[in-house]
Amino acid sequence: MDIEQSQSDLIDHFVKQASAASNAPALSSVIVDATSHPLLFAFSEILALPNVLQLEATDKKLYLDMLRLFAHGIWSDYKSNADRLPQLTPDQILKLKQLTVLTLAETYKVLPYDQLMQELDVTNVRELEDFLINECMYAGIVRGKLDQLRRCFEVQFAAGRDLRPGQLGSMIQTLSNWLSTSENMLVSIQDKIKWADSMSENDKKHRKDVEEKVDEVKKTLFKKLHTVSRPTSTSEGMRRRSALNLLS
């Protein structure tokens, strides 16, 4: 099963669980389970549920903030706000570090090892490469190449994260710009095709005109040779017959 399908099934599962939660403690428990699940990396559908948003006005608000962190944040965000969030389990810490790699991979195509080690609190290259291979590439959230010589991770694919607040407008604008550029390029290509077709037609017409003129010249010369008087010598006759053969 690919990551998109597994995400869809898991999202449906946790959305149903969160929707059915009858009180804030039960809802908080669902949020912890969702953010701890090893295969779930998208949380916006859960975050958008009315009863989840209602946690804002309860003493369980910190679980709503934690869900927002997993939807849009990275490991350094948690470290900066740890005193205002629930303590994370080992599974949640792993998940948040995976999401950190995913966020960086969405933004940059080449990730220096030094940057990754700093963002993930990893102390050596071997530990970092094991994390990228075992926890990120095997999980299917990124694909890429480890370049030990250049000390970097070259990103080939990164699964998308939840859209951050305000990011939708920027994405729509980017797609609109891309569409406009593509349309202009298509018009330019079509114009070049028309020009090439026109040049081809002109070339064909010119070649036809030349061939017709050559045929006319041949016919004119042929007629002139036939209308001249009979040759007075055998050698002269042979020369004229040779000329006629060349024109025919």
Image (cartoon, rainbow, N blue to C red):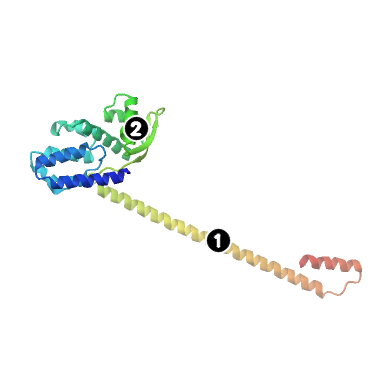
The local secondary structure at tag 1 comes to: helix
- Residue at the limit of the structure toward the right, as seen here: 233
Please tell me whether residue 215 is drawn above or below residue 21 in the rendered image: below
Residue bearing mark 1: 199
Specify whether residue 33 is in view: yes
Tag 1: Cα neighbours inside 10 Å, few (<14), some, or many (≥20)? few
Compute the Cα span from label 1 to label 2. Answer: 56 Å
Instruction: Name the residue rendered at 19%, 44% in the picture.
Output: 14
Residue 139 position, x and y percent, is: 31, 37
Horizontal and vertical percent for residue 159? Answer: 31, 42
- Residue 125 found in image quarter: top left
As displayed, is residue 184 above or below residue 44?
Answer: below
Looking at the rendering, in which quadrant would you find the C terminus? bottom right
The amino acid marked with disc number 1 is: Met
Q: Where is mark 2, residue-wise?
A: 133
Counting other residues with Cα less than 10 Å from the Cα at mark 2, is it few (<14), some (14-19), or many (20 or more)? some
> Where in the figure is residue 201, as x and y percent of width and height?
56, 64
Q: Earlier in the sequence, mark 1 or mark 2?
A: 2
What is the quadrant of the N terminus in the image? top left
- 184 sits to left or right of 228: left
Q: Residue 126 appears in which quarter of the rendering?
A: top left
Q: Give SS at disc 2.
A: helix
Q: Which mark is residue 191?
A: none
Q: Position of residue 245 (x, y in %)?
A: 80, 66
Tell me, yes or no, whether the two marked residues, 1 and 2, touch with CB atoms within 8 Å.
no
Q: Looking at this view, is 19 or 201 the one in front?
A: 19
Q: Residue 76, can we see it?
A: no
- Residue found farthest to the front: 1
| Residue drawn at the location 24% of the way across and 43% of the way down | 42
Q: Nearer the viewer, residue 78 or 204?
A: 78
Q: Name the amino acid, label 2.
A: Ile
